[in-house]
Every structure is written in C-alpha cells, then in structure tokens.
C-alpha cells in the first residue's frame, strides 16, 4: 500500500516536474550568490592579457591559497615566463624534467645559437617534451584546468597559456572490488580516478566506436562526469536522453556517482533503483556491449549503467564465466533466496497467526510448543527480531572491522541464544530471521528494497494474514510493471515478454545460444552468428559405428 | 487534494476486497486449543449426547521434547467432556472448561460410540460437514463400546491417543488391509446413496501386557445411518478386494506337502461390473488381479520350482475367492450393500433402476456373483530355496 502511495506521489511529481526544476534552480542561485557570480563571470570569458605580470596577478587574486604555486623563470636569456600549478596535483619530477629543464637549458647556449624569435607556439612545437598540451586564452578555462591538475605555462608578450597535462597525485591502486567479489573472472575494480577507469574500459573494448564524453557537473566541485557508450550499439536517443538529464543537474557538488544516480533516475519515489551500478570493468564492458551506456564519475569507483532492468539484479558477472548449468542453478537459487528474504517472516506470521490449518500437524505442534509462553504476538516477535537484525547489520558495516566481528558475535550468539532461553522469542522465529538475513545477502543489488518490502509485508501479514501478503505482493508487482528505466520497461524480458530475453533470465543459456542482445536495448540486435555452437570436427567418410578411428586417438 | 482523493479510492478498493475473503481472524498459537480427536457418545439423559474433545497440552509436549522425550511428567493431552443436545452447542460449552477456544482444523479422528452408531449418526454429522473449520478428511471410526473410553487409553509410543489411533488406521489399511480406512467425505458419500451401506473401522479396548491398549478390529457396517453389524478381519479384506483397496497383506496357504506358506501382496487391483440377466436377476462379475511375493515358508520344499509356483498361485486364488465370498455372504446376511453393487446397476441401467431401487434389498439377497481371481507369485525374497533343504 505504501508503495502505491509513493507511486501516486511520483506521478504527481512528474506532472509538476517543470515547475519544480525552475524553483530548484532559483533556490540554488539564491542560496549561493558566489556561484551565481562565478557563473556570470564564466559566460563573459575574459581573455588573458599580453603582460605576464598582469596575468599572474589576476591568477594570484583568484586563487589565493597556499597550495597554488607560481614559479617564475627566464629562458632564452631574455624572456620572462612562469609555470602555475597546484601543489600535489602534478608530477613535479616530470614537470622539472620536461618543462623547466629544456626551457632553462637554452640559457646556457651562445646568443648565436638561440632561435631568432621565440613565441609561445614555438615553445610548444619545439621546446617542451610533453605530449598532452593545449593552448588556451580564456582566463577561466585556464583556472579550471589548473584546478584539475594541469600545469599552465605563461610567457610575457603572449595572451595564450599552454596547459600542460602532467598530472600526478597519490591515488589508491587497482584493488579487488569489495562489493562484487568473484571466484572466477577478473579481479580488478574501478578506482577513484576517472582516467584510470576509462582506461580500464578501453582495455576491455579495443574499438574506435567506444566513445567517452565528459561534462563538468557541480558549480563548486566541477566534477568530471563521463558518458561511455559504443557508437552503433547504444541507441542515439538513449545517449541524447542521458545528456539532457545530466544537463538538467544544477547543483553545487557531485561527490559520488550516487549523487548523479539520484538526479537522473526515472522514479525518484520508488524503492527500486532504476540505475544500476558496478565496480567491475568487465561487467560494465559487458553492459556497454549489450547497448547500454555507462556514466563514470570522477572520485567514485562505482560506475552507473543505464537502462537498468529488474532481472539485472539477479545476474552476476561470474554467471557468464562459468559454464551454463551451474550458473543456471545459482540464478534460480538467487530468485528463491530473494523470495525467502522478502517473504519468510511475513509467511511465518501469517501461517502461525491466521492460517494454522495450512501447517502440517507435526510442524504445528512443534511451532505451538515453541510459541508457548512467548509474551509477544508473532508479528511483534518478528518485527523485534527483524529490527534487531537491521541494527546488527548496520553496526557491523559502520564499525571498524575487528569490532564489527565482536558485534556480530554478541548479537547473534548472546542475544539470539539468550532471548530464546529466556522465553522472549521462540526458537523457530530465530531460525526464520536467520534464513531471511542470509538470503538477503544473495542479491546485493536489491538489498535496500528487500529490506523495505520485507517489513511492509510483515506488517500486512500481521494485520491481514495471507490476504495482506497477496495484496502487498500485487502492489509491488504492479509498481514494478509501471517502472521504466530510460525508456526500457523495468520488467523486461518478462513484461513485455521476449523469448530470446528468457535465455538470460531465470536460467542462463549457453553463450553460443544467446544470439540476440536484450530486446529493444541496442540498435543492432544480433550479437553473433548462429554457427557459434561448438562441435567436434565431422569426418567426411562414414565410419562403422562403435569403432574408434585411429586419428582421434 | 487530487492525490488524496485518488489515494482514498485505492485504499477503499483494497478494504473492499477484504470483505470477500470469508471468515478469518488472527489467532495466536498460544491461544489455540488444538483438537486432535473427537468422540461422540450418548448422554445419560435421553436425547442428549456426550462430546469428548482431545486437546493437545502444548506445554507438556515441550518438556518432553526438551528432556529428550523421556515420557514427560504430565500427559501430552487433555480430554474435555461435556453433554448437550446438539454437537455445536456442546462444543461451545466446552469453552467454559477450557482457557482456549477449540481449534478443529487439525482434528484427526471422529469416533462414534456404539450407542450413537446404533441410534443413527446423521444428526451428528451435520456440524462437521457445515463448519468451515473442520476438515472433511478426518477418519471416521466406531468404538466397540464408548468413544470417551477409547480416547482415554494412553499409547506407549505416541504422545496423544488420537494420533495413535489415526496412525493405526493408516498403517492397518496400508499393510494388512483387513479393515477399510474411511474419511468423513467418503462416509458422507456412502450415506448419500440410499442403497449403499456405509462402513467404518472399529476401535476397541483390549488388555495389553502393560495396561489397556486400543486396537483396530473389524469393520462396522451401517444400514442407512444405523450400525447393524460388523465384518471380521477376513470379511473386511474380502470387501477391500472387491473395492480394489487392498494395498498389502499376508495370505496364508498350504503347500502340496501340507506346510504353511505366507505370501505378501504387493500389488492388487479389483473391480466389478454388474448386469441384469434375462430372468431379471442381478449378476455381478468381480475380477481381481493380485501380485505378490513369497514371504515365508515352514517346510523344506523348494518352492521356486515353476509347478510349485503355479500351485501356490492357485491356492492364493482360492483364499482370495473365499474371502470375497465370505464378505458377500455377510453383507447379504446383514442386508447391507457395502460394495455399492446397486449403485453400479444404477449407473448402467438408469431406466430399469427406478423399478429396482425399492426392492433392492431382496435383489441383493438373490444376487449372482462370479469371482475371477488372477493371482501371481513373482519373487521368492532374498533366498530361493529354504535355508535347510530336504
């Protein structure tokens, strides 16, 4: 029921979306006057002056901070110049070696050996040992680039600055992702640095059609957000939609991809996420190859992929790396675990308080004897234990790891055991909650929604029994069917039904049999040729049955 | 305001659904008195009945479980008794003695005392067919004497007498097939057919080595809704052969040399077809197929020889035939069509039946029966020749 209310609210919000955006934009501008001025300044784009001193003074005025470094020097015995950078964002050794050294060495040459005239283009073309270099004359662009780690080279008499990209800062290495560990498959995970992340995707897909598009979002943080897609696979409408939604974000800070997710998702009032995320380059590459698009955010190892369908939550990268039989078994197991995780407490309460006739007699007797003397009704018992479970989990996640373990031991053993022997909680209820808890970890993508559905169903079961569960599940189902993610129905390939999609739904067909990409996702549906099925070589001449040919031995 | 209105509509719609789902309520497990068995006897005053409900004593069951099942300090059950005029009012009156409301969905058996069975059971059945909480698959039994006493006989193995009796009925019909296991809906179906006689197993109290024990012995035969007589074990199995309900059982026979052999039935099937002969009599052809294994032999003969097997099969044929004939004779003696021969005539000759229905009792007495038995002996068990040959 709660979900339904949310859905209604969402419709309402969609109707009023435009007005809301306007008011939002107004609010932002009101709250931060500085950003407004910055914005207006940006649109004016004042150029650099020809005087080095004026430029440096202007830079100094804007970036008054002690990590802002200006190094003046003279080269060619007469030309005053400076490099400007942020300390800590550049690789100093490389800058010394490839910028300062070649420039200042020509001071040692005789006058006759000096080039006759030195302008800034000559410096770029003949004197700097750097690949990534760009001329820029707009003052704010220069500031922006310096802030993101470029080194600016300015010289007297030139109204252009050379932006030299020799970035280098301390960063975390490439680790195994914590959230999606695999037994078989690549173990590298994305890092917090955008460029490294794009390179990891590029290394998986060596194709010129793989496109990266970067935009800066956040008036203060100026975070790089990168749209990744494969041209010719991803639908152009999808990319256009992503660009538009990103363009609509008017906020001052983007610190994590979760921010972006919340600004661009289709159903902000739904408990189901309509934007998927992953820490694994191989997974993101696979999704790109299905025609989806990815959004990388600088500073976050979590890469967003859109559109997302519900069944994606039940897929794991490893499903495709191990052979289809075991993968299919595990898929089915995940679905079972998902339903256990949302239904187990509700069903237990409904059966034990409403539908005792559904329980086999011997089981009823042991349940009844376990419930004898328990002071709470079953629904209260379940709610207490569920809340306790959530507290335990939260405590375990937030605390430092060694203490976290202690929490689980105290929680699980001491409290669980003690509550049963003190007669506060029935032993079967502890088992039900334990099964629920364990099951909820098998589908990590839906852990949040599972937790909410579980409690809602439990309350419905407590008031209405099995009818409550039926109503709750129907509302969830209707809601799921109403969701869309970037134009794709959330329940694809179940509704609308797609036969080829079912090959990768509850079970996974062999890779050679999945000839088509998910329906409606990509521009080009055919993934591979029909002849990919492996088979042993066929002999031309017929051999008598039952004899083994020598050649095969 | 608009969302509020729409929300209200949704909520009202959901609430309206709730009205359609019948009769239910939340009852916690520790507010239930789970009834496992019920007995109906005649009350002391004329026209009254005495009702016995066997309710599980949940607390005692738990102590038994926690102590490793050592018999417990108290009984695992409580018998509530009350007398009244109707079943429903008597059941409700039990609430005066019990802190919890009786819960019938897990009731296993319904026992009629001999006194009420002889008087007629129809008037007591109505409640059990009408009430939504009771189940139609409870086993119906008739007590040799009083149902109340049967429910008071403790079992050494099971915690609860009702559970014990229910298991006995099931095991008995599965392994010896000497009396029929009848559930409430089957019993009711038999009562619905005017010419068919309902049957139910009889439970009696007998002296065991360790006090009284309850025991399934024989089959009660109803004419209309009144108990008129009983079938013994042989006749009971005869009935089951005809109905095709024999699941297993032991047949004893003698070898040519005169030693006893017991053979186990593993598969059996029986059916009958009836026809009206030219002289207006009813002829019933019963065909029974049986397959079994050699289970035990007394003597030293080698019975795995084909001629011996054929001989034993013939012996089995005879035994089965005699059991069937015994059942038919007894049924004719009681004037009760326990087999449903009349109903099969009804199905086959609907026009003629109208004239026959009223004098079916006479026709049943003169019925001509042909029994065809095809018994097979398949295996000889782990050994083929006896351990000590001649």
Image: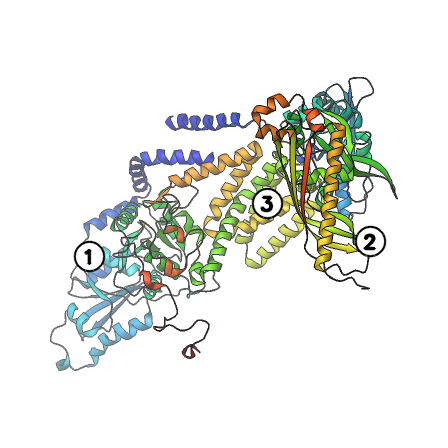
Quick check: A296 left or right of B52?
Answer: left
At label 1, counting other C-alpha atoms closer than 10 Å, the crowd grade (few under 14, some 14-19, many 20 or more) is: some
x and y percent of residue B333 in the render?
A: 76, 29
Sooner in the amino-acid sequence: mark 3 or mark 1? 1
Spatial separation of the CA atoms under disc 1 and disc 2: 121 Å
The residue positioned 72% from the left and 28% from the top of the image is B365
Q: In the image, is residue A142 above or below residue A390?
A: below
For disc 2, the marked residue is B258
The residue positioned 33% from the left and 36% from the top of the image is A14
For disc 1, the marked residue is A138
Quick check: A297 left or right of A162?
Answer: right
Spatial separation of the CA atoms under disc 3 and disc 2: 76 Å
In the rendered structure, are the residues bearing label 1 and label 2 in contact, judged by CB atoms less than 8 Å apart?
A: no
x and y percent of residue A233 in the render?
A: 28, 56
Q: State the image quarter where residue A23 is shown.
A: top left
- Location of the C terminus of chain A (image quadrant): bottom left
Secondary structure category for the residue under label 2: loop
At label 2, counting other C-alpha atoms closer than 10 Å, the crowd grade (few under 14, some 14-19, many 20 or more) is: few
Labels 3 and 2 positioned on one and the same chain:
no
Secondary structure category for the residue under label 1: loop
Q: Closer to the camera: disc 3 or disc 2? A: 2
Secondary structure category for the residue under label 3: helix
x and y percent of residue B24 in the render?
A: 59, 28
Asked whether A392 or B129 is in front, the reply is B129
Labels 3 and 1 positioned on one and the same chain:
yes
Q: In the image, is residue A12 above or below residue A413?
A: above
């Amino acid at each position: 029921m709660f979900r339904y209310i949310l859905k209604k609210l969402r419709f309402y919000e969609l109707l009023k979306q435009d007005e809301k955006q306007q008011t939002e934009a107004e609010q932002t501008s009101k709250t931060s006057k500085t950003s407004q001025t910055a914005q207006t300044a940006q649109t004016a784009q004042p150029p650099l002056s020809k005087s080095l001193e004026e430029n440096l003074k202007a830079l100094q005025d804007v970036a008054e901070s002690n990590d802002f470094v200006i190094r003046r020097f003279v080269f060619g015995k007469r030309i005053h110049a400076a490099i400007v950078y942020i300390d800590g964002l550049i690789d100093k050794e490389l800058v010394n070696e490839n910028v300062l050294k070649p420039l200042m060495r020509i001071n040692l040459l005789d006058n006759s050996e000096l080039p006759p005239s030195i302008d800034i283009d000559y410096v770029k073309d003949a004197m700097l040992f750097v690949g990534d270099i760009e001329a820029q004359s707009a003052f704010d662009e220069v500031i922006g680039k310096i802030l993101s780690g470029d080194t600016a080279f300015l010289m007297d008499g030139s109204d252009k600055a050379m932006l030299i990209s020799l970035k280098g800062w301390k960063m975390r290495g490439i680790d195994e992702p914590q959230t999606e560990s695999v037994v078989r498959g690549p173990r590298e995970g994305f890092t917090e640095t955008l460029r490294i992340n794009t390179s990891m995707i590029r290394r998986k897909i060596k194709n010129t059609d793989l496109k990266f598009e970067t935009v800066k979002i956040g008036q203060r943080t100026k975070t790089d957000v990168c749209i990744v897609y494969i041209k010719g696979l991803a639908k152009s409408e999808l990319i256009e939609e992503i660009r538009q939604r990103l363009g609509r974000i008017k906020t001052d800070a983007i610190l994590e991809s979760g921010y972006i997710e919340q600004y661009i998702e289709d159903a902000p009032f739904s408990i189901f996420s309509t934007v998927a995320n992953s820490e694994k380059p191989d997974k993101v590459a696979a999704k790109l190859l299905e025609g989806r698009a990815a959004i990388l955010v600088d500073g976050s190892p979590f890469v967003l992929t859109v559109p997302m369908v519900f069944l994606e939550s039940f897929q794991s990268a490893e499903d495709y790396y191990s052979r289809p039989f075991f993968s299919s078994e595990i898929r089915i197991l995940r679905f079972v675990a998902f339903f256990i995780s949302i239904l187990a407490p509700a069903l237990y309460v409904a059966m034990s308080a409403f539908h005792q006739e559904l329980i086999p007699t011997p089981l009823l007797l042991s349940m009844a004897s376990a419930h004898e003397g328990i002071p709470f009704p079953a629904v209260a018992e379940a709610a207490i234990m569920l809340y306790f479970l959530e507290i335990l989990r939260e405590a375990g996640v937030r605390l430092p790891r060694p203490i976290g373990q202690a929490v689980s031991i105290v929680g699980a053993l001491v409290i669980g055991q003690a509550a049963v022997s003190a007669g506060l909680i029935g032993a079967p209820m502890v088992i039900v909650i334990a099964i629920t808890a364990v099951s909820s970890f098998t589908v990590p993508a839906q852990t949040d929604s599972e937790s909410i559905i579980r409690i809602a169903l439990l309350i419905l079961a407590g008031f209405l029994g099995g009818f409550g569960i039926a109503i709750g599940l129907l509302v969830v189902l209707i809601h799921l069917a109403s969701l869309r993610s970037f134009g794709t129905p959330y329940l694809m390939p179940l509704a609308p039904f797609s036969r080829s999609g079912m090959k990768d739904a509850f079970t996974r067909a062999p890779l050679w049999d999945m000839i088509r990409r998910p329906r409606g996702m990509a521009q080009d549906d055919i993934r591979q040729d029909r002849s990919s099925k492996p088979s042993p070589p066929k002999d031309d001449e017929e051999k008598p049955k039952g004899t083994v040919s020598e050649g095969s031995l | 305001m608009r969302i509020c209105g729409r929300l209200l509509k949704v909520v009202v719609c959901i609430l309206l659904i709730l009205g359609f789902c019948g009769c239910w309520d939340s009852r916690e497990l520790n507010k239930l008195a789970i009834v496992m068995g019920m007995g109906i006897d005649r009350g002391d005053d004329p026209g009254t009945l005495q009702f016995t409900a066997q309710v599980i004593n949940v607390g005692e069951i738990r102590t038994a479980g926690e102590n490793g099942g050592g018999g417990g300090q108290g009984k695992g059950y409580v018998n509530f008794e009350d007398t009244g005029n109707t079943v429903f009012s008597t059941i409700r009156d039990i609430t005066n003695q019990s802190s919890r409301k009786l819960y019938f969905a897990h009731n296993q058996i319904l026992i009629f005392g001999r006194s009420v069975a002889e008087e007629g059971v129809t008037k007591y059945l109505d409640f059990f067919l009408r009430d939504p909480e009771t189940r139609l698959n409870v086993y119906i039994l008739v007590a040799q004497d009083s149902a109340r006493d049967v429910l008071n006989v403790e079992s050494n193995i099971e915690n609860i007498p009702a559970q014990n009796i229910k298991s006995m009925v099931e095991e008995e019909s599965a392994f010896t097939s000497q009396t029929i296991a009848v559930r409430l809906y089957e019993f009711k179906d038999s009562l619905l057919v005017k010419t068919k006689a309902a049957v139910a197993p009889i439970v009696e109290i007998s002296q065991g080595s360790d006090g009284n024990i309850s025991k399934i012995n024989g089959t009660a035969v109803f004419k209309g809704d009144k108990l008129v007589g009983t079938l013994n074990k042989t006749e009971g199995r005869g009935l089951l052969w005809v109905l095709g309900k024999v699941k297993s059982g032991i047949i004893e026979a003698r070898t040519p040399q005169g030693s006893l052999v017991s053979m186990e039935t593993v598969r059996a099937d029986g059916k009958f077809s009836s026809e009206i002969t030219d002289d207006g009599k009813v002829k019933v052809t019963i065909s029974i197929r049986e397959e079994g294994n050699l289970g035990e032999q007394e003597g030293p003969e080698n019975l795995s020889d084909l001629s011996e097997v054929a001989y034993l099969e013939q012996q089995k044929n005879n035994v089965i035939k005699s059991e069937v004939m015994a059942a038919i004779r007894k049924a004719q003696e009681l004037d009760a069509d326990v087999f449903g021969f009349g109903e099969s005539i009804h199905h086959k000759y609907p026009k003629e039946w109208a004239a026959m229905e009223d004098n079916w009792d006479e026709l049943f007495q003169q019925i001509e029966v042909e029994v065809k038995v095809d018994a097979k002996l398949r295996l000889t068990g782990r050994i083929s020749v006896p351990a000590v040959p001649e």
